[in-house]
Image (cartoon, rainbow, N blue to C red):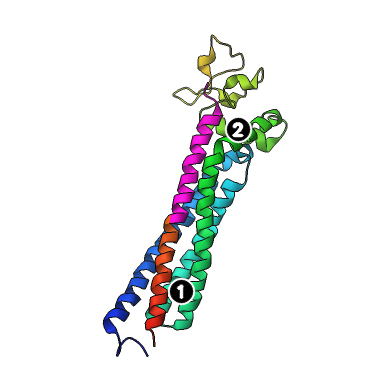
């Protein structure tokens, strides 16, 4: 029996509350997927320098669970409108599993933020000697130094006598200066700041986005579980 003859007010409040929560969750899922993909693409240039898969792993969790949230929120909307109890049960169980997974992804983002400097420093130190002989590392260093306008781990002297062209500054017209014979007198042609600090800050900002997105969406999932339980009990 539907809400037509019993508990019209309370039943409809729960039904439409669950519907609204699912709409918000649907939008949140899309945003989470978009943010996860953006982070994976935006930080891919430093893959070989970060030194851990924890950061990428939390971004992948955000993408996968975000997609599941989108699908499950559609199921929740349908279950609330049609007042189908079995759909609400499936919805609740799925929501709980996604909640746990997304919360873990969010926590991983914050955990990584706390250890990011150490892992990046170790990764950069190890990869210095592979520059020029291992293409993924070479490309990662070049793109990191170009995009973040930095050089070496702590500074250009880390490269000793083999400073990469990617350390050179560019002119206003996009022309890259020559920095092969850099010394203390002409170091103005080179990006003197080390990549460790700027890369750490860059990754930390992305880790905060991962953590915050996962936790915010998880809060909406809790609301979905609460309203689905209430609606389940009200459906006769």
Q: Residue furthest top?
A: 185
In the rendered structure, does residue 192 fall within the stretch colored magenta?
yes
Find numbered disc 2 in the image and state the secondary structure of the residue it sits on.
helix
Q: Residue 181: x, y in percent? A: 61, 13
- Rendered image: mark on residue 12: none
Find numbered disc 1 in the image and state the secondary structure of the residue it sits on.
helix
The mark closer to the camera, 2 or 1, is 2
Q: Residue 26: x, y in percent? A: 42, 64
Residue at figure coordinates x 58%, y 38% from the top left: 46
Residue on which disc 1 sits: 75
Q: Is residue 3 visible?
A: yes
Numbered range of the magenta stretch = 191-215
Residue at figure coordinates x 55%, y 44% from the top left: 112
Magenta residues, dominant SS class: helix
Labels in figure, total: 2
Tag 2: Cα neighbours inside 10 Å, few (<14), some, or many (≥20)? many
User: Which image quarter: residue 1?
Assistant: bottom left
| Of the pair 112 and 194, the residue shown nearer to us | 112
| Of the pair 93 and 202, the residue shown nearer to us | 93
Q: Is residue 161 above or below residue 132?
A: above
Residue on which disc 2 sits: 121
Q: Is residue 26 visible?
A: no
């Amino acid at each position: 029996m539907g809400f037509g003859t019993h508990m019209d007010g309370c039943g409809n409040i729960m039904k439409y509350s669950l519907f609204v929560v699912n709409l918000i969750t649907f939008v949140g899922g899309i945003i989470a997927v978009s943010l996860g993909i953006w982070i994976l693409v935006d930080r891919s240039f430093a893959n070989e320098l970060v030194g851990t898969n924890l950061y990428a792993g939390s971004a992948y969790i955000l993408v996968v669970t975000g997609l599941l949230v989108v699908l499950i929120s559609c199921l929740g909307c349908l279950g609330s409108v049609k007042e189908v109890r079995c759909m609400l049960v499936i919805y609740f169980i799925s929501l709980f599993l996604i909640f746990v997974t997304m919360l873990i992804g969010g926590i991983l983002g914050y955990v990584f933020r706390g250890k990011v400097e150490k892992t990046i420093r170790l990764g950069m130190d190890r990869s210095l000697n592979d520059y020029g002989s291992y293409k993924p590392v070479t490309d990662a260093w070049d793109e990191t130094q170009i995009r973040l306008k930095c050089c070496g781990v702590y500074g250009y002297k880390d490269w000793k006598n083999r400073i990469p062209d990617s350390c050179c500054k560019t002119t206003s017209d996009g022309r890259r200066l020559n920095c092969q014979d850099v010394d203390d007198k002409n170091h103005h042609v080179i990006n003197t700041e080390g990549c460790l600090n700027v890369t750490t800050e860059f990754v930390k900002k992305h880790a905060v986005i991962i953590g915050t997105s996962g936790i915010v969406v998880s809060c909406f999932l809790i609301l979905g579980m609460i309203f689905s339980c209430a609606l389940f009990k009200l459906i006769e």
